[in-house]
Image (tube, rainbow, N blue to C red):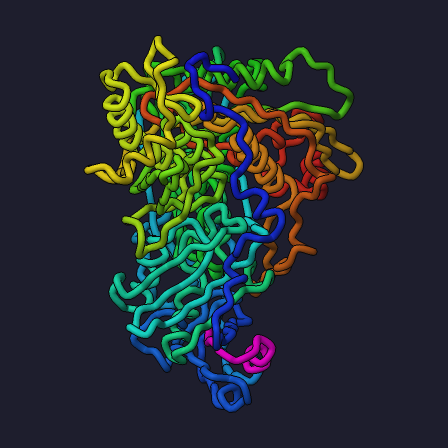
Amino acid sequence: MAHGDGLKVVGKRVSRLNGPDIVTGRVAYADDIQLPGMLYGRMLRSPHAHARIRRMDLSKARALSGVVDVVCAQDVPELSIFPSEEVCYEGQKVAAVAAVDPDIAEDALELIEVDYETLPPVIDPAAAIHPDAPEAQVGVPTEEVTDSEGRRLRNVASYQVIEEGDVERGFAESDAIFEAEYRAPYFHQTYLEPTSATARVEPNGRITVWKSGQGTFTIREDLASALKVAEGRVRVIMTETGGSFGAKNRLILEAQTALLAMRTGRPVKVTMNREEEFLDGRPAPGCWVRLKTGARKDGMLMAVEGRIVWDGGIEGRGGASNRLLGPYKIPNVMLEGFAARTNKPTPGAYRAPGGPQTAVARESNIDMVARELGIDPVEIRLMNGLGAGDYAPSGAPLQHDWLRDTIRKAAETVRWGRRRLKRNQGMGIAVGDWQNASGQTNAFVTMAADGSVSVVTGQVDITGLHTVMAQIVAEELGVPVEKVTVTLGDTDTVPYTSLSAGSKAAYSAGTAARKAALEARERLLRLAAERLEVAPEDLAIADGRVEVVGSPEHTVGVDELAGMAIDSEEGPISGRGVLNRIPTYPTYSVEVATVEVDTGTGQVRLIDLVAAQDVGRALNPMLVEGQMQGGAVQSISFGLMEGYRYDDEGRVLNPNLLDYAIPTALDVPNIKTVLVEDPCELGPYGAKGVGEPPIIPGAAAVANAIYDAVGARVTEMPMTPERVVAALRD
């Protein structure tokens, strides 16, 4: 898209700079690390969702030829990285083995004897908080919350209430009210690259860890805390990441890997297999929701009342209850949010954490209210959506109509209301919102004598970020993007950097890159001004040269200036951008799904999907479109096929890619992306973060499209054929 602002590189469709290395296998991933004398680690995992450990015998495993170390909680009582008395989910790490060969390590696991006394597991989050439910973890403190009869609820790790206005009055003034219960299961990020880590103790006693993930310094913090050592004793080197989507933000097996290296004095690598990923990864949480929505006959939303119980796994991780409100103006609100402990692994982040689950309930209710009132689903969202002059949930005033513009663009693209559909075909719209994050980040720019540029940053590249940073630096320094190289520093070489998460990487690191490049640019202009005998403000940089404005024959090459700088008093051309937090903005995604439903089998065929997103400005439209398409696919996958299945004993029934369904190329329709560009004030060149929003509305859009097609409201994810048939019967 032409912006008319003279940008040469930013805003252009530049391919990922490391793309060829990725597709040809030259990139080193975590499992590619090979060190001399390396041992291989494996984890013994609990076969039970909840049990007491009565006895453990490691002697036979330790005696096996080729085994170098076996460790459990009794060997390291000062650490909390293995359970000593109680296991609380299937797959929990109970002991670790290090051996000279991975097969020997696997054989050693079978020789470890553990005597368990099984305990009743807690599986369903709504049932988990019932006063008569068993404890998910014996004796762990919980929140003091009571039911309507005054009985204390069980397994409540956290509790939140949001109350505004007068809900009873709001419903009394409503002409249409819809109430329903919704359920969503755990669902996994299913990244291609399984979790892997390699650890080595250096001669000076420091620990070096290689792994993949989204935050080098976050892993260092967590690792130092888990091992009870100073952060300065730990060095973390992040490898290329073959997918994470939030799951690898925190420790998974790094502490156990490092412990084995510390105990043996040899490098140790541990790589999880796919079943372990499902049993002991960091999937997205499930939830149970009851939501009631009311509106006046003119379509104005008047009240929302509800309760959400997050399936928080054994640590009781919860989500934000206000996501049930979304980007709408609703004067009367009463929401209760619970995080329930269950006998499942602790969930982690998954691209807009909590967004897709809550959007299904919120957007379904709004659609049903609109239908009862005879109001178009697009119009009710335009009428109630936040716009210029309103305040975002963060409290920041909105200066733009970003949401309404995105709704309109999506509706125009899909020809909403003008497209003729066949029998049992339907169209559904849904909206998602996210608050762009920011955090500590950095970029350091140096220029070689030939004008080539090096950028070093602590910000992990998971979405083509380094390509965008290269574009920004190339733009400011007037060099081709091919002359810019971006390198990821580690915890020893760059300042503290926060996670590449929360749609903040390009927003924050892009700002740091521009700041560093502008500092280098200023130096270039000062040198050129001396050489050309003009004032720096009379100069412009473009196409590898600095020229006098209005007199293009008076020019000097950037490479020549870079060479001059090497021997100058100030030294080589360089720039530095180190930032903490910068103000952020809400960003919006709108998706419209068109489906066809087979009323006999319940099979849902997705005909097409339009994904529109408010991006501020697309620094690289090709990468932005990739993010939007990827997030949209994950959202419809959550809606139609994904989800953990548990039996009554808390065992996972589908911990593999044969039984855990994710879409193939045949399941994904043509996804049309619509980039809505209305720059924000503080992002680099007006850009916003784009990674999270596209996963939010897709499943909700499909649910609304199914209802539009056949009049069946499916309220439990995934919307399998069986559930569609059941909804048709109801």
Residue 393 image offset from top left, x and y in percent: 34, 28
Relative to residue 728, is residue 369 drawn left or right?
left
- Which of the two residues, 232 or 130, is positioned nearer the viewer here? 232
- Which of the two residues, 4 or 549, is positioned nearer the viewer here? 549
Q: Quadrant of residue 672?
A: top right
As drawn, 145 above or below 530: below
Q: Identify the residue at image location x=30%, y=50%.
A: 494
Q: Identify the residue at image location x=43%, y=61%.
A: 210
- Which of the two residues, 292 or 40, is positioned nearer the viewer here? 40
Q: Residue 8: in sight, yes or no?
A: yes
Residue 126 image offset from top left, x and y in percent: 48, 50
Residue 447 image offset from top left, x and y in percent: 35, 38
The residue positioned farthest toward the top in the image shown: 550
Q: Is residue 99 magenta?
A: yes
* Residue range (magenta): 94-108
Relative to residue 515, is residue 430 drawn left or right?
right
Residue 54 image offset from top left, x and y in percent: 44, 82
Q: Identify the residue at image location x=38%, y=69%.
A: 81
Q: Is residue 144 magenta?
A: no
As drawn, 259 above or below 14: below
